[in-house]
């Protein structure tokens, strides 16, 4: 699905910020796509790429086996912007010089602009930027000039205005860089001359046409979880093909309190979507008995989900497609690009293909979108505010919010605590102000005193974060009286809990979920 014939390509050299770059481009209402760093130049042209960004990365261009792009990209006649490792690659491959920096530049720095040109138009003469590099450009390639510098790098911004090649030694995509989005916007809109017309309303129309063309008269089955991704996918596909869509909701026994009933009410009763419910909680819990390793839990839950789903599909006739709410970050994180130095953080059980025995073709109408774009799509499709802005919920459910073994007793405790947390956040008008909020069951017991008696009960941790896209996150600093109320209610109302803690870690280095 290609919603526009104007694409900004981000060649991925393994930076932790590659996805952030792609998001910043889309904020300019221009379509971006992440490619392997060595993607052939011809492929980029065939896809309609009008500008290329070389991402940062952990390697050094001075190493013999350092990742390199196809050298032909420099002969295409389209603008190129190198960021961090990208500027070093640009300089190195165009016969400039890169040397190890005497002092590694990491964190905040001061950028002083000498000449603005198109790239730095409208940017203040001095701004704070975010650095992360050990090498630096020491000699410019022919045709380039330095237009800005930092304390540690004379060539912090370089430009060849004739060929429209540019390099930034810092990261403009992160929030720590002042006016970083404006710099990227200048490259995308002024230099690449993109129209800025990639709108969600246009995407809906194109997506519906693509689904209808791909599916034809076949039936589609979708694994509905009730979360934002699968709900939006269901609404989009239903808009496109109506009764040809069948949704299957797998109750894996790891859901939040009353979740199955709520999904049935919304999709079966309200949207009139053909919904089948597979109640398989006992089956999942039996397989998970005694398992404590988080990746093993994820794999077991994923495997059982597919098998339950397979059984449900066998009972249907004329189904040729399996639809999933896979998003772009899922695809990037879960399917390592060949040669990409970036490491796999954790597995996603909804990505990676289907068992051959299912013999179904895959339909993933959201795989080009980031999370906030999916929310915008849901709004465009007429879904309720409550559904569109529902907090993310992991595919493995509460299975990855119970540290250690999953048991019915622990699930009950976690469900009751989770209800209280969400109730109080909504009552205090904080639920929609934070990105995600949930409880984590810790496999430890602590001493307490309740009613003049000694207790030895469980611990619940609160995880409440602020974010825009889940790629980075910070813990939400809620009013103390609200945290106190949540803690007090959980301890007093949830039998088996005598202590509540709060997770005050940021991502990175921590992840949002504990497992």
Image (cartoon, helix red, strand yellow):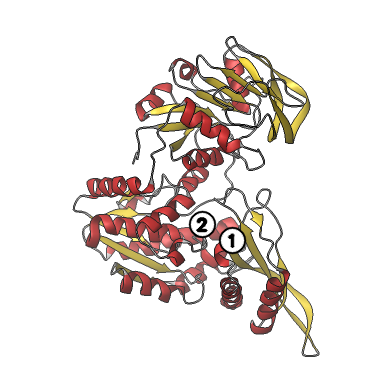
Disc 1 is placed on an element classified as loop
Position of residue 111 relative to residue 237, above or below, is above
Mark earlier in primary sequence (1, 2)? 2
Disc 2 is placed on an element classified as helix
Label 1 sits on residue: 434
The foreground one among 333 and 505 is 505
Where residue 127 appears, as percent x and y from the top left, is 69, 34
Position of residue 135 relative to residue 160, above or below, is below
Where residue 118 appears, as percent x and y from the top left, is 54, 24
Instruction: Please name the residue shown 28% across and 59% down the image.
Output: 238
Please tell me the numbered disc located at residue 249. none
Q: Quadrant of residue 453?
A: bottom right
How many numbered tags mark residues here?
2
Q: Is residue 41 left or right of residue 61?
A: left
Instruction: Please name the residue shown 32% across and 65% down the image.
Output: 312
Mark 2 neighbour class, 10 Å CA radius: few under 14, some 14 to 19, many 20 or more: some
Q: Is residue 177 visible?
A: yes
Please tell me the numbered disc located at residue 299. 2
């Amino acid at each position: 699905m290609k919603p526009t014939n104007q694409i900004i390509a981000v060649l991925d050299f393994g930076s932790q910020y590659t996805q952030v770059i792609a998001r910043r481009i889309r904020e300019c209402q221009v379509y971006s796509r992440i490619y392997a760093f060595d993607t052939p130049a011809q492929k980029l042209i065939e896809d309609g790429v009008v500008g290329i960004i070389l991402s940062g990365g952990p390697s050094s261009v001075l190493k013999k086996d350092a990742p390199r792009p196809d050298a032909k990209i420099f002969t295409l006649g389209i603008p190129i912007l190198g960021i961090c490792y990208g500027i070093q690659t640009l300089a190195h491959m165009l016969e400039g010089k890169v040397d190890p920096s005497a002092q590694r530049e990491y964190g905040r720095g001061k950028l002083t602009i000498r000449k603005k040109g198109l790239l730095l138009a409208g940017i203040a003469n001095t701004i704070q930027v975010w650095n992360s590099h050990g090498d630096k450009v020491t000699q410019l390639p022919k045709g380039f000039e330095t237009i800005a510098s930092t304390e540690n790098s004379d060539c912090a911004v370089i430009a060849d205005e004739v060929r429209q090649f540019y390099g930034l030694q810092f990261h403009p995509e992160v929030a720590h860089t002042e006016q970083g989005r404006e710099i990227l916007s200048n490259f995308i809109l002024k230099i690449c001359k993109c129209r800025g017309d990639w709108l969600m309303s246009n995407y809906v129309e194109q997506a519906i046409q693509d689904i209808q063309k791909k599916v034809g008269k076949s039936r589609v089955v979708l694994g509905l979880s009730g979360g934002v991704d699968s709900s939006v996918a269901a609404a989009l596909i239903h808009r496109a093909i109506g009764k040809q869509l069948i949704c299957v909701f797998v109750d894996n026994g790891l859901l939040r309190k009353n979740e199955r009933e709520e999904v049935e009410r919304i999709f079966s009763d309200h949207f009139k979507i053909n919904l089948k419910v597979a109640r398989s909680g006992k089956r999942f819990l039996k397989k998970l008995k005694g398992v404590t390793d988080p990746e093993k839990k994820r794999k077991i839950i994923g495997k059982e989900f597919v098998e339950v789903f397979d059984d449900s599909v066998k009972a249907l006739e004329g189904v040729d497609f399996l639809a999933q709410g896979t998003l772009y970050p899922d695809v990037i994180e879960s399917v390592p690009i060949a040669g990409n130095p970036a490491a796999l953080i954790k597995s996603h059980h909804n990505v990676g293909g289907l068992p051959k025995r299912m013999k179904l073709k895959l339909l993933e109408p959201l795989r080009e979108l980031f999370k906030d774009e999916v929310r915008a799509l849901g709004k465009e499709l007429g879904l309720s505010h409550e559904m569109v802005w529902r907090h993310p919920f992991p595919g493995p459910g509460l299975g990855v919010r119970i540290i250690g073994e999953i048991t019915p007793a622990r699930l009950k405790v976690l469900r009751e605590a989770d209800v209280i947390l969400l109730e109080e956040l909504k009552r205090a008008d904080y639920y929609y102000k934070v990105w995600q909020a949930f409880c984590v069951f810790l496999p430890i017991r602590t001493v307490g005193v309740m009613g003049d008696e000694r207790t030895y009960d469980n611990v619940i941790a609160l995880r409440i974060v602020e974010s825009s896209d889940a790629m980075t996150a910070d813990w939400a600093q809620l009013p103390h009286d609200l945290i106190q109320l949540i803690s007090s209610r959980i301890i007093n109302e949830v039998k088996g809990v005598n202590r509540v803690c709060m997770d005050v870690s940021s991502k990175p280095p921590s992840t949002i979920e504990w497992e």
